[in-house]
Image (cartoon, rainbow, N blue to C red):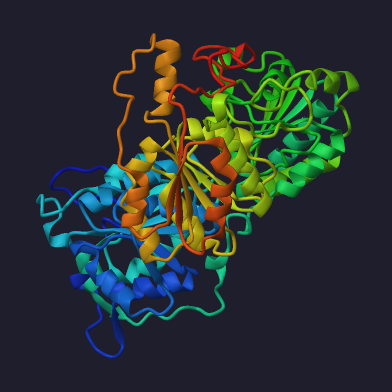
Amino acid sequence: MKAMNASGRSAPPRGSDAAAPPPSEVAGASGPESMMGAEVMCRVLEQLGVEVFFGHPGGAILPFYDAIHESPLLRHVLVRHEQWAAHAADGFARATGRVGVCLATSGPGATNLVTGLATALMDSVPVVAITGQVPQEVLGTEAFQETDIVGITMPVTKRSFMVRRAEDLPRILMEAFELARSGRPGPVLVDVPKDVQTARVPVWSPDPANESGLATSRSAPFPPASPAALDAVKQAARVLNAAKKPLIMAGRGVSVTGMEEALLALAEAGDFPVVTTLLAIDTFPRSHRLSLGWPGMHGTSRANRAIQEADVIVGLGLRFDDRVTGPSATFAPQARILHFDVDPAVVGRTVKVHLGVIGDLRATLPPFLERVEATASSEWWERLRGWSRIATSERGEGFPEPQAGPGGVLTGRAATRMLARHIGRTGAMVATDVGQHQMWMAQELGDLAPCTHLTSGGLGTMGFSLPAAIGAAMGRPDRPIWAVAGDGGFQMCLPELATVVQEGIPLKMVVVNNGHLGMVRQWQELFFQRRYSSSPISGPDLVKLGQAYGIPSRTVSRWDELEESIAWAEGQAGPTLLEFQVPHEENVYPMVPPGAALHQMVETAPSREG
């Protein structure tokens, strides 16, 4: 629920505690029995289990940074731009299931967080952003670096707070963390004026028995299913058990709740085919006989055609967004949709739903599983197997080996296919950016462990992969991680190479470089008569750039260099950078043209492509 407070230029700032008395009226004087608000913030974060956060200091947040300096338990990662702090917190949260934390000062520091918070909101990622604010006595006067960040972030957070009294810091910070990870997870912002950070209050001590902060969104307590939800579960089971062409569509909600094993059990109990969205390709084994791949604009033929012919679709924790459905009027025209989700606002919002089951999947999926029966017929499976579940035209159950382009040229498809094989073999995490490489990687990745595929789905944020990989690496140092970007997105976050080096992160980075904003260029080729308006993009010599930061770097332009170069990068103890130089007119297929129904996809590339 968002705080709906009014605001004016000279009015008190928006926030949940705007009516509280100012700190000057709070009892508590300097002395051995008092501490600063900034010190309270550190102790609360320690109590909440925070070990690492990402940010950039500035004047309005400096008291807190000074307190961090005295905390042996809190590790701060200095990013080069606040947007990347939000994405790093996002990547940390996706990889661990715990709340990611980012920091910024007031004014431009705080506003730079907005894109990262919007990214987290769209993809249901638990993030808490803490911002400094100008002293309350000058609020509303257009003071230096003053912005109403609470008002600005209302549309891109679950809730935004302003703390008006240092005494309220423990309550508000704990509430922020609980809000971020409960229900449908998402970002929460806490704005702390400088005078609240410096105010002295009675000493606050953590409760050693309280370990709730260590809970993840996958393990945090959840409410039991309501009577209405249980009744809907029974009805949904009856509908599914009568189906002739059933289909399960799984979204990120399965990963958020840790219900991957329940999804597998449900699929195998009824021999149900399974489609996973882009944000859920790490929730169900791609090699499993029941897997159809992922649906939508660049999904597989098998997944998209199955949706269009299914008579019952069970949607588990997904939004049915437009990139998955195409025009809602043409989506699944024969299916009764059973939508399981914790957020009632998404049920029926984009597609017509036969029955909504509202509640946490941990409360609704087990009783549903108990009631389902095997319904998928051999005729349905025979039809499904007539369509491809891979991104090229082969129809077999196996997956093709990577192959060179004409004359041994390295292609984007071949490069990502080979890299995906290496990632699968080593059990690594992968963070992708946005564009053609993102689609190729998602199409080519095989079986993945839960929470190991990180990408910006809902907002489609270029520049996401490198900072998200930094955050994931800080949260999961036990796993290798690859950051894969296009040359356009990578240039948006180049300064974060310094963060990688300063923090000693053994990150493996790949830039798929076609000299263009690849997906923009693809659309211009297909739908704008090849008028490549502002899609060609120049860039630095990436090998020299990597070396300037002290990062071993290589360029790969030939197929016969690819496998050895990937192995070389894997063998380096620290960070590495690989540049894959690929043709600029290579496109991503399959592709559903804009405005077309899912079954009207273009499945193969023109013959001129290798």
Which residue is drawn at the image coordinates 65% and 43% (left, top)?
421
Residue most toward the top?
529
- In the displayed structure, 43 sits above or below 610; it is below
Query: Which of these two is toward me, 150 or 525?
Result: 525
Q: Is residue 263 left or right of residue 76?
A: right
- Residue 487 image point, x, y percent: 39, 37
- Residue 319 image point, x, y percent: 56, 32
Residue most toward the front?
407
Q: Is residue 97 visible?
A: no
Which residue is drawn at the image coordinates 26% and 74% (left, top)?
66
Look at the image and tell me in which quarter the C terminus lies.
Answer: top right
Q: Is residue 462 left or right of residue 26?
A: right
- In the displayed structure, 604 sits above or below 72; it is above
Q: Quadrant of residue 352?
A: top right
- Residue 535 image point, x, y percent: 33, 24
Query: Which of these two is toward me, 571 or 173?
Result: 571
Q: Is residue 162 left or right of residue 428?
A: left
Q: Quadrant of residue 364?
A: top right
Look at the image and tell me in which quarter the N terminus lies.
Answer: top left
- Count the marks: how many? 0
Query: Which of these two is toward me, 571 or 1?
Result: 571
Which residue is drawn at the image coordinates 61% and 26% (left, top)?
299
Residue most toward the bottom?
32
Q: Is residue 558 visible?
A: yes
Q: Is residue 577 left or right of residue 244?
A: left
- Residue 121 image point, x, y percent: 45, 43
